[in-house]
Structures are given as C-alpha cells and as structure tokens.
C-alpha cells in the first residue's frame, strides 16, 4: 500500500515538475529583461535586484542538475529520477551547454564588430612588431 502511494506521489510530482519548470524559465527570462533594460545604479534596490538574479540562477541551475524534489522522501526522489529522466536531463544539459557556448561566441563577435582587433604588441603598428634593428 505504501509503495503504490509513493508511486502515485512521484507521478503527481513528475507532472507538476513538467508544468513548473517552463513557468520558472519564463520568470527567469522576465527577470533577465528587467535586469538588462535598466542601468545598474548604486541604490539598495539595484543591489537587491542583482542578488535576486544570483539566487534565482543558482536555484534554477541546482533544480535542473539534480531534478529538484529536495524535501521529498528518498524513495519518491528515486522514482522521479529514473533512468529515462536522467537521460533526458543529460541531453538537455548538453544542448544547453552548446547553446550557451554559441551565444557567448556570438556575443563576443557582436562586441568586436566595428572595433579594431587588439594588437599583440602594445604601441607597435598592426602587422609589424618592430623594425628588426638592434640598438
């Protein structure tokens, strides 16, 4: 009887998790838009905003990596994190990593657009590292 109750509870939590994570992602993106749409100041609310962003980022990252359900009994977590769930989570984390890397590369390229590339030797003209003569 207890086994069926644990399985039913895990099934209910699994459906709830499937509905909850997209909602949290929407909140996170809305928070990102709010954070980047206004300039950073030195007011207390600005410090609170960055703190809230850090906390939300950590909570979402830990929930994605572990599958959440930290306050549930170990048996329920074991049912929730079956082989299929772990496989899907691993695929999603891999895809997320690739998307993050591509986004970072594109962001860096957009930042470099219209600016001169850094010269490896400070003060030397581009393409020349010196006159080649010894003093």
Image (cartoon, rainbow, N blue to C red):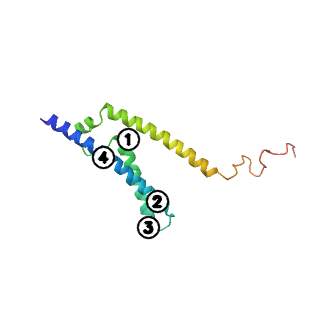
Q: Mark 1 to mark 3: distance in Å?
A: 32 Å
Left or right of residue 92, residue 76 in this image = left
Dot 4 and dot 3 residues touching (CB under 8 Å): no
Query: Which mark sits nearer the N-terminus, 4 or 1?
Result: 4
Dot 1 and dot 3 residues touching (CB under 8 Å): no
In-front residue for pair 115/54: 115
Total label count? 4
Query: Which mark sits nearer the N-terminus, 4 or 3?
Result: 4
Mark 4 neighbour class, 10 Å CA radius: few under 14, some 14 to 19, many 20 or more: few
Query: According to the image, label 3 marks what residue?
Result: 44
Mark 1 neighbour class, 10 Å CA radius: few under 14, some 14 to 19, many 20 or more: some
Front of the two marks 1 and 3: 1
Q: Mark 4 to mark 3: distance in Å?
A: 34 Å
**Which quadrant of the rendered structure holds the N terminus?**
top left
Query: According to the image, label 2 marks what residue?
Result: 35
Relative image position of residue 64 (x, y in whole percent):
37, 43
Dot 1 and dot 2 residues touching (CB under 8 Å): no
Q: Mark 3 to mark 2: distance in Å?
A: 14 Å
Q: Secondary structure at mark 1?
A: helix
Front of the two marks 4 and 1: 4
Q: Residue at x 45, y 55 (%)?
A: 32
Instruction: Pick out the residue farthest to the top.
Output: 83
Query: Which mark sits nearer the N-terminus, 3 or 2?
Result: 2
Mark 2 neighbour class, 10 Å CA radius: few under 14, some 14 to 19, many 20 or more: some
Front of the two marks 1 and 2: 2
Relative image position of residue 89 (x, y in whole percent):
37, 37
Q: Mark 4 to mark 1: distance in Å?
A: 17 Å
Relative image position of residue 21 (x, y in whole percent):
34, 47
Query: According to the image, label 1 marks what residue?
Result: 65
């Amino acid at each position: 009887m207890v086994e069926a109750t644990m399985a039913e509870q895990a099934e209910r939590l699994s459906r709830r998790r499937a509905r909850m994570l997209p909602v949290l992602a929407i909140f996170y993106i809305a928070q990102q838009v709010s954070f980047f749409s206004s300039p950073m100041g030195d007011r207390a609310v600005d410090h609170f905003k960055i703190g809230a962003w850090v906390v939300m980022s950590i909570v979402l990252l830990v929930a994605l990596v572990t599958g959440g359900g930290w306050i549930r009994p170990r048996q329920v977590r074991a049912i929730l994190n079956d082989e299929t769930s772990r496989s899907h989570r691993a695929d999603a984390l891999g895809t997320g990593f690739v998307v993050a890397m591509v986004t970072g590369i594109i962001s860096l390229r957009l930042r470099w657009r219209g600016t001169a590339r850094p010269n490896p030797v400070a003060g030397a003209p581009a393409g020349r590292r010196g006159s080649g003569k010894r003093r």
